[in-house]
């Protein structure tokens, strides 16, 4: 979805991406965004068209299972002031939840 939005609507300014820092590897949200998302093969077409596309991706450290989505007060304020549209694609991977 993110690739399609960036490719189809070049006027989109920034895309804020809520990411949980990795518990296993200790990688930060910005590093995960760079290494796991922006470097993904699903962005190959966009990377060919627009090599600097990832400059529009803004990592926000958080956790959907926590209050305020686990964001810092500063990031929450940035989101309130800057975001006009939200796509929710998060999910739990705990298959034994009630």
Image (cartoon, helix red, strand yellow):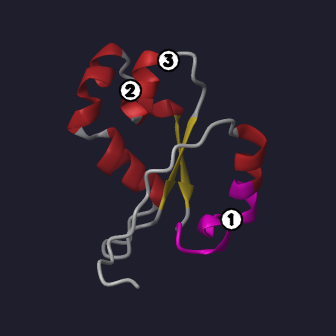
Disc 3 to disc 2, C-alpha distance: 8 Å
Looking at the rendered structure, the secondary structure element under dot 3 is loop
For disc 1, the neighbor class at 10 Å (few under 14, some 14 to 19, many from 20) is: few
Give the magenta part as a residue range. Answer: 64-76
21 or 9: which is nearer to us? Answer: 9
For disc 3, the neighbor class at 10 Å (few under 14, some 14 to 19, many from 20) is: few
At a point 38% along the width and 17% down the height, the residue shown is 50
The residue positioned farthest toward the left in the image shown? 41
Image location (x, y in percent) of residue 88? 50, 50
Tell me: residue 51, above or below residue 23. Answer: above
For disc 2, the neighbor class at 10 Å (few under 14, some 14 to 19, many from 20) is: few
Looking at the rendered structure, the secondary structure element under dot 1 is loop
**Which quadrant is home to the N terminus?**
top left
At a point 33% along the width and 77% down the height, the residue shown is 94
Q: Which mark is residue 94?
A: none
Looking at the rendered structure, the secondary structure element under dot 2 is helix
75 or 93: which is nearer to us? Answer: 93
Q: Quadrant of residue 6?
A: top left
Question: Is residue 53 left or right of 24 when viewed as pictured?
Answer: right
Q: Which mark is residue 72?
A: 1
Earlier residue among tags 3 and 2: 2
At a point 59% along the width and 43% down the height, the residue shown is 86
Which residue in the protein does label 2 denote? 4
Disc 1 to disc 2, C-alpha distance: 28 Å
Tell me: residue 48, above or below residue 90. Answer: above
Disc 1 vs disc 3: which is toward the camera?
3
Do the CB atoms of the residues marked 1 and 3 lie less than 8 Å apart?
no
Question: Is residue 21 left or right of 65 when viewed as pictured?
Answer: left
Tell me: residue 48, above or below residue 60. Answer: above
Which residue in the protein does label 3 denote? 9
């Amino acid at each position: 979805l993110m690739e399609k939005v960036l490719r189809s609507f070049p006027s989109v300014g920034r895309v804020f991406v809520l990411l949980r820092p990795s518990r296993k590897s200790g990688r930060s949200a910005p590093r995960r965004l760079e290494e796991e998302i922006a470097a993904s093969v699903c962005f190959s077409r966009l990377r060919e068209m627009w090599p600097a596309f990832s400059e529009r991706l803004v990592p926000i450290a958080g956790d959907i299972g926590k209050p305020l989505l686990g964001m810092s007060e500063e990031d929450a304020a940035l989101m309130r002031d800057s975001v006009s549209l939200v796509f929710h694609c998060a999910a739990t991977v705990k298959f034994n939840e009630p």
